[in-house]
Amino acid sequence: MVQTILIIDDDITWIKRFTRYLESYRYAIESANTTDCAKDILEDFKINLILLDLCLYGDKITPEDELFWEYLHSKFPKLPVIASSAWQLDVEEAWRLWQNDLYGFVDFIDKNKLNLNSFRQRVESVLNAKQITKENESEIHYPKKMNKTPYYYDIFISYSHKNQDWVYTHLLKRLEREDFRICIDFRDFRIGAPLIKEMERAIIQSKKILLIFSPEYLSGEWTEFECVISQAIDPAARERRILPIMYRYCDLPLRISNLIYLDFTDQNNLEHQLNRLIATLKE
């Protein structure tokens, strides 16, 4: 029996590429470049799988896509979906979207790293897979890297580049030895993206935010950080997401001054403070 795949993408080039490739493996293809068109197709045809381009705003799906997800969930709760995107959304972020009652979101492909052979295998595995539902979700065995945290990173480190030697050598390496997944600008910020947007993405996607305070940080990076912090962080600090670290003495900003900070100014007490930090991060 021929299985039908619905490709939803506003880029006709990608529709043609996916269509050409999937038709060569004898799948029937329907395509739509708007969600309204996709709804008409879903009402008129039996669809076995959806290949959906995710339109993202920062690290979130757009309101239009969110409404379409809700439509799929209510009308076709057992229909599997493979999401695609040219953004760097990976399986953990896909899991976070899937968690928000978007059942049916079972896989994700990165257009920037598309390997057509592995893509075909993923399509076949999704079509043949046991359908994920709220009832059988506990029976599904996910890859080890996939977890149910709403955050992609454990930690985002915000610091002054004038203090980078200490941050890289003493802080970053030590925390990574504890298997924390860390976001840091020189490695994880996307080339060509606006700095403020990348900072906002890092804050939203990180469970904890380490602020490395020093006079240099206050006169530079803090100004940029403060521009996005109010929109992304719980102002009452109930979740204790912001963890201030005093690397070199300075007056803490008013927004941070009511928080307990870790004092890293005494190198003789560094190991004790690192252990306190690690214990807090593991809570």
Image (tube, grey):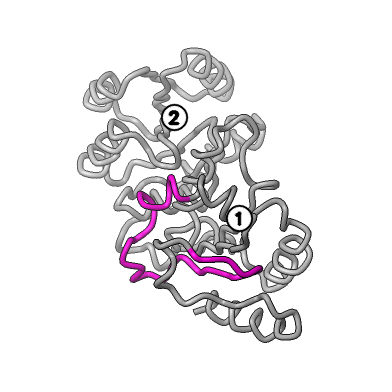
**Labels 2 and 1 touching (C-beta < 8 A):** no
How far apart in space, not on screen, are marks 2 and 1 (Cα)?
39 Å
Asked if residue 246 lies in the magenta stretch, the reply is yes
Residue in the image at 64% along x and 55% along y? 216
Please, what is the three-letter code of the amino acid marked with disc 2? Asp
- Percent across and percent down for residue 253 are 46, 61
Instruction: Give me the residue at 36% from left, 46% from top.
Output: 104
Q: Which residue is mark 1?
A: 217
Seen in the picture, residue 203 relative to 260 is either above or below; the reply is above
Query: Which of label 2 and label 1 is nearer to you?
Result: 1
Q: Which residue is mark 2?
A: 53
Residue 23 in the image: above or below residue 120: above
Give x and y (percent) for residue 39: 25, 25
Task: Give the magenta range.
Answer: 226-252
Q: Is residue 62 left or right of residue 157?
A: left
Q: Quadrant of residue 35?
A: top left
Q: Residue at x 60, y 34 (%)?
A: 119
Question: In the drawing, does residue 225 fall left or right of residue 246?
Answer: left
Task: Tell me if I can see residue 1 in this picture.
Answer: no
- Does the stretch in magenta take in 195? no
Residue 145 appears in the rendering: yes
**Above/below status of 103 relative to 281:** above
